[in-house]
Amino acid sequence: SPNSINTLVFTSTNKQPTIDPLDTVAFLMKKPGQTANYSITLTGISDGGGENQTVSLSETHTNPSWFSSFKLSYTSPNSTGTLSFSPVDNQTGNTNVTITVSDGSTADNGFLSVQKMSFVIKLIPFVNHAPTVDPITVFKVQKGNVNKSIYLTGISDGDDGSQTVTLSAESSNQSIVTNVYIKNYTGGSTAEINIRPIAIGTATVTLTLKDNGGCWLGGSDTKVMPIKVEVLEYYDNETANLPAPDIYPNPAQSSFTLYNPGGKYNQYVLAGENGKVVQQGIVLPEANLIDVSGLAEGFYVIKLSGKNGEVTKKVIISRK
């Protein structure tokens, strides 16, 4: 009749191919000059189920100049594929990606032969952080024409540890503190500043740490720490200048380095959480390699002792 509404229902003989949806996938950019290769796994790919069709994938994306490579890899009839890409240096922002899945069906003029899935790749900028070092404000020392050490701990690149950190030091007054240079630094978390306090007075030793992460987007690659060096006629408490012992890496796998600055301690005892002693030995000045390959994973307490007292630190052994 003129007032009736007819609904036409069309049923295709082909099932629409599938792919699992994605929304926004974020990636933290590498520092400039560092190779940045990323990938996204695409899942849930099929011809719609039980049709034994050859599935193909294609992609389109915005901002192609942002990438030195952008590649889609897939082999039918696998249920997963990979989208690999490499952003150019200093590139940040959002790129819209559309993945098209096709089963190649010509049934019903290709009706339901294609599935499209769109998502966003978000490139988050790398902002370099300045290197770190445990603070030292004042260093007191007795006058003498002999070399002394200012012990440094807590040295890092300020980020993930992948950068190279260089150290340098200089004296503000060579007539009071001379022969200033970095020693016993191998890229770890500890080092020493060599000084020779030849006259009574005060000088500033300036330590500079610099990594290779750059200063892009307001980042910082340099840490400067001034140390006030007081040279006295007599000073018999130089152990007060010594920093606490350090353990690295911690957690450890099969061994760790016990840093004993100035030889403040001369023996160690390692005990489990239950207090049972599992290992002990002598401690030499500076770096000591402690083998724990025969110990089970878990939490331990190491006690260091010497003429200047005792100190305890926690150690974790983990092989994951």
Image (cartoon, rainbow, N blue to C red):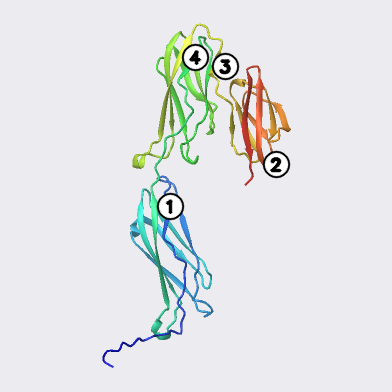
Identify the mark at residue 27; answer none if there is no mark.
Answer: 1
Q: CA distance from mark 4 to mark 2?
A: 43 Å
- The residue positioned farthest toward the top in the image shown: 233
**Label 1 neighbourhood size at 10 Å, few (<14), some (14-19), many (20+)?**
some
Q: Residue at x 51, y 30 (%)?
A: 154
Q: Quadrant of residue 69?
A: bottom left
Question: In percent of the image, x 53 and y 17: which residue is there?
Answer: 148
Look at the image and tell me whether residue 254 can be seen.
no
Work out whether 239 lies above or below 251.
Answer: above
Structural distance between the alpha carbons of marks 1 and 4: 48 Å
Residue 312, percent across and down?
A: 63, 27
Label 4 Cα neighbours within 10 Å, binned few <14 / some 14-19 / many ≥20: some
Q: Position of residue 192 (x, y in %)?
A: 52, 24
Q: Nearer the viewer, residue 211 or 155?
A: 155
Q: Determine which residue is flagged by label 2.
A: 296
| Mark 1 residue element | strand
> Which three-letter amino acid code belongs to the residue tagged 2?
Ala
Give the residue pinned by disc 3: 239
Of the two numbered discs 3 and 2 on the same chain, state the one appearing first in sequence: 3
